[in-house]
Image: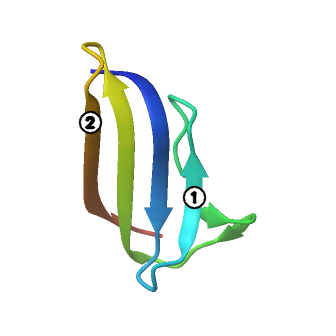
Amino acid sequence: GISSLRFFRVYNRLGQLVYNTSSMGKGWDGTLNGVPQGAGGYVWMAQGTNYTGATVTKSGTMVLIR
């Protein structure tokens, strides 16, 4: 498990950052500046520290469906 979150970021297919947070438990609502984003593929990246103090970095893709 993650004890602290350094960042959670979501990028669109053009590489534009559409969401960024360092707060645990907060997720992306599918908008950018209050404007709903289009359906399609997005990339997410997260980095944090686990309970042993090691840095954990994860990334993946997701599909936004409207």
Q: Position of residue 13 (x, y in %)?
A: 41, 82
Q: Residue at x 35, y 27 (%)?
A: 49
Earlier residue among tags 2 and 1: 1
Q: Which residue is mark 2?
A: 56
Choose top left, top right, bottom left or bottom right for residue 55: top left
* Label 2: element kind: strand
Q: Residue at x 25, y 59 (%)?
A: 60
Residue 53 sits above or below residue 8 on the image: above
Residue 30 visible in rendering? no
Q: Position of residue 8 (x, y in %)?
A: 46, 47
Disc 2 to disc 1, how far (Cα)? 20 Å
Residue extending furthest right? 34
Answer few, some or many: residues within 10 Å of disc 1's Cα (few below 14, many 20 plus, some between 14 and 19): some
Side (left or right) of 13 relative to 16: left
Q: Nearer the viewer, residue 30 or 19?
A: 19
Q: Nearer the viewer, residue 41 or 53?
A: 53
Side (left or right) of 41 relative to 52: right
Q: Nearer the viewer, residue 64 or 24?
A: 24
Answer few, some or many: residues within 10 Å of disc 2's Cα (few below 14, many 20 plus, some between 14 and 19): some
Side (left or right) of 51 relative to 25: left
Q: Position of residue 39 (x, y in %)?
A: 45, 77
Residue 4 sits above or below residue 59 on the image: above
Q: Quadrant of the N terminus?
A: top left
Amino acid at circle 1: Tyr
Residue 20 visible in rendering? yes
* Label 1: element kind: strand
Amino acid at circle 2: Val
Q: Which residue is mark 1?
A: 19
